Image (spheres, helix red, strand yellow):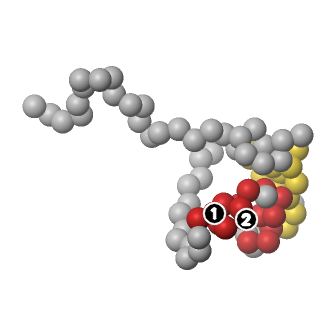
Amino acid sequence: MIKLVASVCIEAPVASVWARLATLEDIQLWSEPVLHARCEGAVTQGVGAERTCELAGHRIVRDAEIPAYPRHPPLPRGRSTRAN
């Protein structure tokens, strides 16, 4: 499995940015390499949604929305990451 990570700063209210990103099929409106996108299955937004993107050069990318999780699980109470 390939993991891609990207970051961008957008000067707009958070709610309006997430509203735009929530419509997964609209990725071709703001991502130039994507020619066409469609959701597979009954779930089209949020966790469980699966999207297929058609890119230039007849390339296909399939992705799925998964739950967010912390990079590191919380430590049990009374534990610290600091060296003593």
Horizontal and vertical percent position of residue 37: 85, 58
Question: Looking at the image, which residue is at 24% across and 25% down?
Answer: 79
Quadrant in which the N terminus appears: top right
Look at the picture and state if 18 lies above or below 32.
Answer: above
* Residue located at (83% from left, 47% from top): 44
Q: Measuring from the top left, give residue 82's x and y in whole percent.
A: 18, 36
Q: Quadrant of residue 18?
A: bottom right
In the picture, measured across the screen, residue 57 lies left or right of residue 79, that is: right
Residue tagged by mark 1? Answer: 15
Circle 1/circle 2 CB separation < 8 Å: no
The residue where tag 2 is placed is 20
Q: Nearer the viewer, residue 51 or 58?
A: 51
Instruction: Say whether disc 1 or disc 2 marks the residue closer to the N-terminus.
Output: 1
Q: Residue 74, position in %: x, y? A: 38, 31
| Residue under the image location 53 percent in, 63 percent down | 7
Cα–Cα gap, marks 1 and 2: 9 Å
Location of residue 59 with respect to 72 vertically, above or below: below
Tell me if I can see residue 54 in this picture: no
Residue at image coords 88%, 54%? 38
Q: Amino acid at mark 1?
A: Ala
Of circles 1 and 2, the one toward us is 1
Q: How many neighbours does mark 2 have within 10 angstroms: few (below 14), some (14-19), or many (20 or more)? A: few
Work out whether residue 29 can be spotted.
yes
Q: Secondary structure at mark 2?
A: helix
The single residue placed furthest to the left in the displayed view is 84
| Disc 1 packing (10 Å; few <14; some 14–19; many ≥20) | few
